[in-house]
Amino acid sequence: MSDDIGKIIGDRVRNYRKRRGISQEELAHLSSFSVSFIGEVERSEKSPSMDNLYRICCALGITIQELFDHVQPSSQSKEAEIISDIVNKIQVLQTKDLILVREMVDLMIRFKR
């Protein structure tokens, strides 16, 4: 697994975990892994197998497809990379905050016209 995809997976696992308000310890318990394994996945130090990813996703209440939503190929443009980074970062926000982000983007677009 390339470093890029490992980082994406780790970031996504961390973001979904935080968004659900659970600790690494809770995720480890729910997925039957050690806390150190969950930490290593989040820091992209370990490359989990598909079976292990499935167990982590089940514990997070998401599908593997959701884990990889909006992932761009490594040959993406700088703009696509920035968009992907923004999407990854805002995944930890609550719905009300996501609505605020959308409104801010709408305002920026209106003022650029």
Image: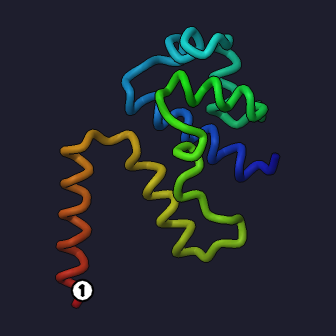
28 horizontally vs 91: left or right: right
What kind of colouring is applied to the model shown?
rainbow
Q: Is residue 110 above or below residue 71?
A: below
Left or right: where 14 falls relative to 77: left
Quadrant in which the C terminus is drawn:
bottom left
Which residue corresponds to the image point at 57% horizontal and 9% vertical from the top-left?
Answer: 29
Query: Left or right: 51 with respect to 70?
Result: right
Helix or strand or loop: what does disc 1 sit on? helix
Residue farthest toward the bottom in the current orientation of the protein: 113
Residue 97 appears at what percent x and percent y? 22, 46
Q: Residues within 10 Å of mark 1 (few under 14, many from 20)?
A: few
Count all numbered tags in the image, as a single digit.
1
Residue toward you, 39 or 20 = 20
Q: Residue at x 66, y 45 (%)?
A: 7
Q: Position of residue 66 (x, y in %)?
A: 52, 45
As shown in the figure, which amino acid type bears the numbered disc 1? Lys
In terms of depth relative to the viewer, which is nearer, 38 or 61?
61
Report x, y in % for residue 92: 38, 40
Q: Nearer the viewer, residue 39 or 29?
A: 29
In this view, 21 is above or below 94: above
Q: Farthest residue in the right direction?
A: 1
Which residue shows up at 40% across the image and 45% down it?
Answer: 91
The residue to which callout 1 is attached is 112
Q: Position of residue 59 (x, y in %)?
A: 53, 21
Q: Quarter-wise, where is residue 47 in the image?
A: top right
Up the image or down, 98 lies above or below 42; here it is: below
Task: Quadrant for residue 13, please give it.
Answer: top right
Residue at x 70%, y 37% (from the top left corner): 44
